[in-house]
């Protein structure tokens, strides 16, 4: 996955989706956006369609000043995205603390780790 060109696949009002390599997808949310339940469901549906139900590594990147409604947050934590691993990038400390708290009590079937930058998230996924 090192130094590969991003292949832009999908764009919506809240997210851009890229293929980093054959088994890694990047969901890059747009800055200054409130992500609602339908936005997350859209992203999950696109993940299923793109992967054809084959497990992939996933990076979900939330820029600063991007937040999720309570309904969207609950859906993200409760749903079981079929993946090899999930790296979630939050730029702000408050976002990271909240995410770690949610995932502490809602375990996924695959590894999930929260990062403050995409570079470290990619490095972690490369080791999996």
Image: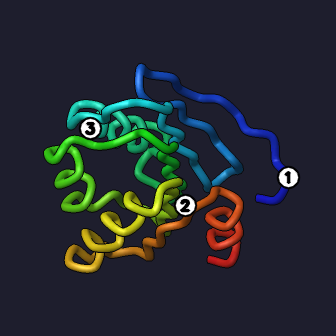
Q: Nearer the viewer, mark 1 or mark 2?
A: 1
| Figure check: 106 above or below 69 | below
Give coordinates of residue 120: x percent, y percent.
67, 67
Quadrant of image for the C terminus: bottom right
Here the colouring is: rainbow
Marks 2 and 3, the one that precedes in the sequence: 3
Which numbered marker is on residue 57?
Answer: 2
| Figure check: 27 above or below 57 | above
Q: Are marks 1 and 3 in contact (CB under 8 Å)?
A: no
Give neighbour class at mark 2: few <14, some 14-19, many 20+ (Cα, 10 Å): many
Give coordinates of residue 79: x percent, y percent.
22, 57
Residue extending furthest toward the left? 71
Give coordinates of residue 9: x percent, y percent.
59, 29
Q: Residue at x 21, y 41 (%)?
A: 69
Q: Which residue is mark 1?
A: 3
Give neighbour class at mark 3: few <14, some 14-19, many 20+ (Cα, 10 Å): some
| Figure check: 128 above or below 53 | below
Give coordinates of residue 117: x percent, y percent.
62, 59
Secondary structure beneath disc 1? loop
Disc 1/disc 2 C-alpha distance (Å)? 16 Å
Q: Are marks 2 and 3 in contact (CB under 8 Å)?
A: no
Disc 2/disc 3 C-alpha distance (Å)? 18 Å
Quadrant of image for the N terminus: bottom right
Residue in front for this viewpoint, 116 or 52: 116
Q: Which residue is mark 3?
A: 41
Marks 1 and 3, the one that precedes in the sequence: 1
Q: Residue at x 49, y 44 (%)?
A: 64
């Amino acid at each position: 996955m090192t130094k590969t060109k991003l292949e832009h696949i999908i764009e919506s009002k809240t997210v851009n989706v890229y293929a980093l390599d054959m088994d890694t997808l990047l969901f890059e949310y747009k800055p200054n956006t409130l992500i609602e339940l339908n936005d997350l469901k859209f992203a999950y549906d696109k993940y299923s369609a793109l992967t054809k139900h084959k497990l992939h590594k996933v990076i979900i990147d939330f820029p600063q000043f991007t937040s999720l409604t309570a309904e969207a947050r609950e859906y993200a934590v409760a749903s079981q995205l079929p993946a090899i691993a999930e790296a979630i990038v939050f730029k702000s400390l408050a976002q990271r603390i909240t995410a770690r708290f949610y995932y502490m009590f809602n375990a996924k079937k695959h590894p999930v780790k929260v990062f403050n930058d995409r570079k470290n998230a990619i490095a972690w996924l490369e080791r999996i």
